[in-house]
Amino acid sequence: MTRFLFIVIGFLLIHCSLWAQEFQQIESAEYDPSQNRWLVSNSTSIIAQSETGVLSFFGDATASHGMEVMNGNLYAISGDLIKGYDLATGQEVFSLDVPGAGFLNGMGSDPASSRLWISDFSNNRIFELDVSDLENPVLDPIVTNTVSTPNGVVFDQFNNRVVFVNWGSNAAIKQIDLNNNTMTTIIQSGLANCDGIDIDENGDFFVSSWSPTRITKYSDNFSTSEIISAPGLSNPADISYGIGISTLGIANSGNETLTLIEFDPSSAHDITEKNAKLNIFPNPVSSASRVQFELNTAVDIDLAIRDAQGRLVQRLLSGIQPKGEHQVLLNGVNLESGHYFLYLSSGSNLSMQPFVVQD
């Protein structure tokens, strides 16, 4: 009886340990270049995903929403608290209670000045937090009424501004000029329930939205945009762009998964490829390959992969898509080596591109 009880307890401990190291109620993803890993807020804990996909706890750290890696620490929202953890040890090095906080949500950072910006979703505020001296942090509500419901936040070092997205229909994307803390609206996005935002090495922005479920990439001045679709997106929440690895990490709160989208920095601004009506590159395809197409008007389309015999292999997109540039990532599409054809059809119009998958 004692041996049986020991076995049962041992099984439960092992089972609970394995279960605990799965993503649960994830909200935020953040890239840690010091160890080439992704840190993901996991209910009340933080899970680290290694380069090879192995999951482990990031010490005893806790996080409920936005996180930022800055100057050797991970800063994280944990309820009404802003926490700081040493990236090397996972030990807590900072904790600050935000007075009167409603729902702290998004976070952005500037390593050069050791500042953080935090959105208060419920109270329509943006805080600035100076942590250059961890013993004497300075918290300042630089916007006390966003006249919207602020969510994801990012610092734009190229223009000395904070850019944040908002919840709700036709959600605005707004900016705060850090020279005088003046807030203005950049654009009405036409998206509903924008959640996360981040910036790449070229100053372009990525925005996640729940309706439609997608990632939208904007030029540095928000004058142009393109749509990025990827398998597995579900209520995409906070996002993080890993500049050193040209990869966008997306925390999917709808299905508790982490989506990683690789980009080819050499083709980030390739105008020739972007102007193509239908293209797939690189070709032969790899996990970083993407389909690029442009629509002159909103239209009902079908985008599918067929084999050399014309048989349907996988449908990538179907339904009405908005006007503009679109990207569809292939990093979640598993194809055996061989020759394939990419078909884009709308009514009687058909475009086709051949491509190759190699071992």
Image (cartoon, rainbow, N blue to C red):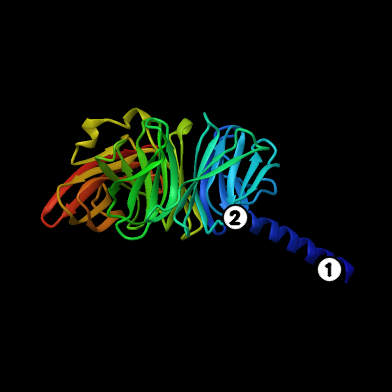
Given residues 261 and 126, the one toward you in this image is 126
* Residue at horizontal 53 percent and vertical 36 percent from the top: 115
Q: Quadrant of the N terminus?
A: bottom right
Farthest residue in the left direction? 348
Residue at numbered disc 2: 80
Given residues 147 and 88, the one toward you in this image is 147
| CA separation in Å, label 2 and label 1 | 44 Å
Q: Amino acid at mark 2?
A: Asp
Please tell me how many numbered marks the rendered image carries.
2
Say which of marks 2 and 1 sits in front.
2
Q: How packed is label 2: few (under 14 Cα within 10 Å), some, or many (20 or more)?
A: some
Q: Amino acid at mark 1?
A: Phe
| Earlier-in-chain disc, 2 versus 1 | 1
320 above or below 226?
A: below
Residue at numbered disc 1: 4
163 above or below 315?
A: above
SS category of the residue bearing label 1: helix
Residue 130 is drawn in which quadrant?
top right
List x then y, in percent, for residue 335.
38, 47
* Residue at horizontal 34 percent and vertical 48 percent from the top: 173
Given residues 341 and 106, the one toward you in this image is 106
